[in-house]
Amino acid sequence: MNFSTFGIESNEYPPLLREIGSAPMLLHVRGALPDPTLPAVAVVGTRKATRDGKELARKTAHELADAGVIVVSGLAMGIDTEAHKGALEAGGITIAVLGNGIGSVYPAQNEKLAAEILSHGGAIISEYGSDEPSYKGRFIERNRIISGLCLGVIVIEAPEKSGAISTARFAAEQGRGVFVFPASPHNKNYKGSHELIRDGATLVTNVGEVLEDLGLKKSHKLEDQMKELSGDEYKIVSVLKDAGTPIDIDTIIELTTLEPQVASNIIMTLVVEGIIKEGSTGYEISNS
């Protein structure tokens, strides 16, 4: 198995990772490290993810990759796996950080996924050599590398004792952004997530909020914007998109079957967000 090894003083060593106080002296890499000027964000969470959590992780990673962001995670089952897959589906680059030696993939079920990461221009990274055994504590240690490679960490579904919590803690210590998707207070899979929010992490409901907070450019493609709309917002934008010409508010209400006050409030929000605009004859898509 071919891999490269870079010392902390090497030009190839990731600059952001070098900044952290506990940066590994050696980094073993399979594949190619991406351009260090490209932004990277981690997506992490529980191995025992729910279906909704998995869908959110994949969608989040897909949207990050669409915005030109490298997605970093730990190749574990659950949220990590979905994050890598979402980035790959978007044609983006993703990096997997191992808690075991660079010579093997853990868990073995993700060997195919690891191969796809490499074939799509990504990288698999470990601070441990090919012959080094894995220990339980090393999976916590590697989390500092996940956060250290990134501008911020997004936490999806973190129970009280999830390893994702340690990644978030490392990110906070490193001065990186910590972003958390919330859920019902009765959902045990989010107990750790809610504790992070209580402790000062940023609550987010979509990728756009993460990109804005990190000062990264959000995609202005209408298709990408529509992915983040609520159901009623989507109805209005779809009607305007299909029309291709300005439509007055009465026609919008008729075509969407929304209550007048609801439609009016949503239209105002969409105008403020720059997704639609008002002209002399009605409303239309801003980039039409």
Image: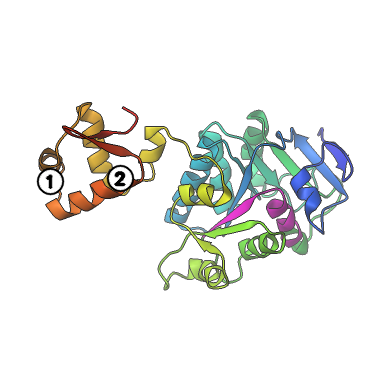
Q: Which residue is mark 1?
A: 257
- Front-most of residues 128 and 260: 260
Q: Amino acid at mark 1?
A: Thr
Q: Amino acid at mark 2?
A: Leu
> Residue at the location (16% across, 34% down)?
247
Q: Is residue 243 magenta?
A: no
Query: How was this image coloured?
Result: rainbow
Residue ranking furthest to the front: 280
Gap between marks 1 and 2 measured at Cα = 18 Å
> Residue at the location (63% across, 30% down)?
120
Q: In this rendering, is residue 72 above or below 123? A: below
Residues at discs 1 and 2 in contact (Cβ within 8 Å)? no
Q: Residues within 10 Å of mark 2 (few under 14, many from 20)?
A: some
Residue 60 is tagged as none
Left or right placement of residue 267 versus residue 77 in this view: left
Q: In this rendering, is residue 123 above or below 157? A: above
Quick one: quadrant of the C terminus? top left
- Front-most of residues 196 and 214: 214
- Front-most of residues 191 and 171: 171
Left or right placement of residue 253 versus residue 32 in this view: left
Depth check, mark 1 against mark 2: the one in front is 2
Question: Is any atom of residue 281 visible in this view?
Answer: yes
Residue 260 spot, x, y in % from top left: 13, 51
- Mark 2 lies on a secondary structure that is helix
Question: Is any atom of residue 78 visible in this view?
Answer: no
Q: Is residue 146 magenta?
A: yes
Left or right placement of residue 145 versus residue 282 in this view: right
Q: Which residue is mark 2?
A: 270
**Magenta-drawn segment:** 140-156
Residue 9 spot, x, y in % from top left: 89, 43
